[in-house]
Amino acid sequence: MEYREFFERVKGFLEQAEIHKRRGNNDFNPYLQMLSKNDEVRLHSRLICGFLNPLGNHYQGDVFLETFLECVGLKAWFDDTSNARVHKEYENIDVYITNGERHIIVENKIWAGDQDRQIERYIEIIAKEQSRDSSDIESSELESSENVAQQELSQAYENIAVLYLTLDAKDPTQQSLGKWEIQGDYLVDKQGNKVLFKAISYKDEILKWIENSQAKVGCITSLNAALLFYKDVVQIITNTKENTMSIEKFLTDNKENMQENMKIAFEILENKDKIIESYCEAIVEKCREQIESKDFEIVKTSKDKKMDSWKRNSLSYPFMIKPKNCGKYYFAFCVEYYIQKEEYSCYGVRIFEQDSDSSMDNNISSKIIEYLNVEYIWWLNDNQKFWWYAFDTSITELESKLQEFLDSEKIKDLNDKLKDYQG
């Protein structure tokens, strides 16, 4: 396959993907605008608890809780859900479900590690709360009272279930279990006490619960949307979200062209650095007339100098857009190459010194910022206090970000102020 034909097909794919986006196929998720997809406590535990709580503002009673118990196989064991209560972070338990007789401990683990004797502690807390309080029994009855207390504690264990929720239903570590060991569907200690146990996963039980809950709420738009967005989050963290317009699907979907597609794709990857360098140079040349008309100039670093810079600082600036008439220090837009474990390119705004091919030391930059008497410096993405570094690795936006720099009155004002600063 020729390159022209390949890129024509890529163009068609991108145009079709854009149509899909306009028709509603997008990656916007309100939950992920506020919290990380892996936030166990503030996102997942809170949402799960909010839905499961029969007294929640969803006003659906125990519908979500009942559905959840069906999905994890505890519906018959738990029995009555009409008076159930669901608590978040009860005695540090992620989600605690109880109807007064039965008790479910849900330990939610996405990436966090197990704490020492964590599950053991939770079991003991709930078991002791449910067993008879023997603290007021007289000393003459101590021996018999201890026996009674032990019996009640053993009975309390029988009314407890532990659900260990992870991405892929892995078991907790022995460090977390403490005195308990996993034996089939139970946790068992050396005295023969048993607690129901099941390892569940976001990939299976939680996704199933979300889908079954959607079916039950029917046309209640707000709840359906809330569940749909949460399903999207769960599919993302479990790598089960299908993207019908993915570049991977485009490259491998057509079996006849797959070999040719991959050959070109791997050739592009092998020449990535050269392609990016050529792309950056083309953008700079394309904007040359505008750059010069706005009193900026293009400074290029030779390859030899670039390699020397790599050896010295692992950092170089092959393309720099700087003001023509500037003081000793100035703000410039630059494309940089950085070598650490592997080479990559990025771009943004830095403070430079005349006749230097490297950006300012942080201490000097601090003095310059203090001199300019500004709390925030205008950057390419958002205002931020990390004023010494504001770079972007999304190289496809290079042209638009360069345009923002050239059009910025703030940059012009800052460079004018710096003309009188000598350090």
Image (cartoon, helix red, strand yellow):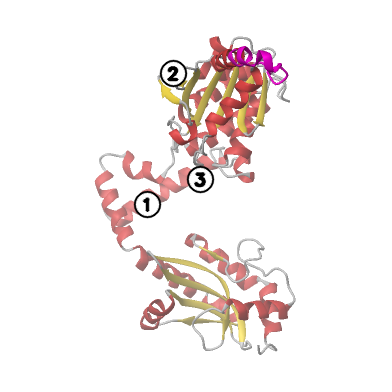
Mark 3: which secondary structure?
helix
- Which is more toward the observer, 111 or 227? 111
Can the viewer see residue 294?
no
Q: Quadrant of the C terminus?
A: bottom right
Relative image position of residue 186 (x, y in whole percent): 45, 19
- Magenta highlight on residue 139: yes
State the residue at coordinates (66%, 71%): 408
Quarter of the image holding residue 419? Answer: bottom right
- Magenta highlight on residue 185: no
Quarter of the image holding residue 342? Answer: bottom left
User: Does 195 sit above or below residue 341?
Assistant: above
- Which is more toward the observer, 168 or 104? 104
Residue denoted by label 1: 8
- Which is more toward the observer, 69 or 294? 69
Q: Nearer the viewer, mark 3 or mark 1?
A: 3
Mark 1: which secondary structure?
helix
User: Does 301 sit above or below residue 160?
Assistant: below
Residue denoted by label 2: 185
